[in-house]
Amino acid sequence: MIKITVTSVFVTDQAKALDFYTRVLGFLPKTDEPAGGARWLTVVSPSDPDGVELLLEPNGSPIATTYQQALREAGIPATLFGVDDVMAEYERLRGLGVEFPSPPVAAGNATVAVLDDTCGNLIGIAQPIDAS
């Protein structure tokens, strides 16, 4: 069986990303090891510290930079995180100064809000819409 153990998001500054993803979004630091001229720097959900790790990967190549910029310009989130209450999380994060291009909206089977991670990405937070 194959399972996801690490996924990544390109970031413009690893230290700034670590601060944002831990202090603001509430993830926990997991791994911080030297990796060439950068770091193998991962965070995890506090509700699943042994679960999937998010690698804060430096966008040190022109390909990564172009990809990151193209997603942002198109308004496409680089990744999507699940939340129990998207409106409460939206308000909490706005209170911390996080910028959202627009308020939460219904999108298919979820309510989604898109935020600026301060490191070159748009990130989505989503709450499934209860179909019952």
Image (cartoon, helix red, strand yellow):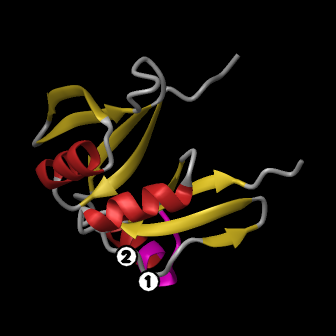
Q: Is residue 47 left or right of residue 3?
A: left
- Which residue ends up furthest to the right in the rendered image? 132
Q: Is residue 23 magenta?
A: no
**Residue drawn 40% across and 64% down?**
91
Residue 119, given in percent of the width and then of the height, sits at 25, 63
Name the one closer to the observer, 122 or 111: 111
Answer with left or right where residue 38 lies relative to residue 85: left
Tag 2 residue: 69
Instruction: Give SS at disc 1.
Output: helix
The answer to whether residue 74 is magenta is yes
- Left or right, 69 with reference to 2: left
Task: Give percent across and percent down for residue 3.
Answer: 62, 24
Q: Are marks 2 and 1 in contact (CB under 8 Å)?
A: yes
Q: Quadrant of the N terminus?
A: top right
Point out the stretch of residues depicted in magenta.
Answer: 71-77
Q: Position of residue 116 (x, y in %)?
A: 34, 69
Instruction: Please tell me the numbered disc located at residue 73.
Output: 1
Residue neighbourhood size for the residue with mark 2, other residues' Cα within 10 Å, grouped as few (<14), some (14–19), many (≥20):
some
In space, the residues marked 2 and 1 are separated at their CA atoms by 6 Å
Q: Residue at x 56, y 51 (%)?
A: 85
Q: Secondary structure at mark 2?
A: helix
Q: Amino acid at mark 2?
A: Gln
Going by the numbered disc 1, the residue's amino acid type is Glu
Q: Residue at x 21, y 45 (%)?
A: 23
At a point 34% along the width and 60% down the height, the residue shown is: 93
Res 65 quadrant in image: bottom left
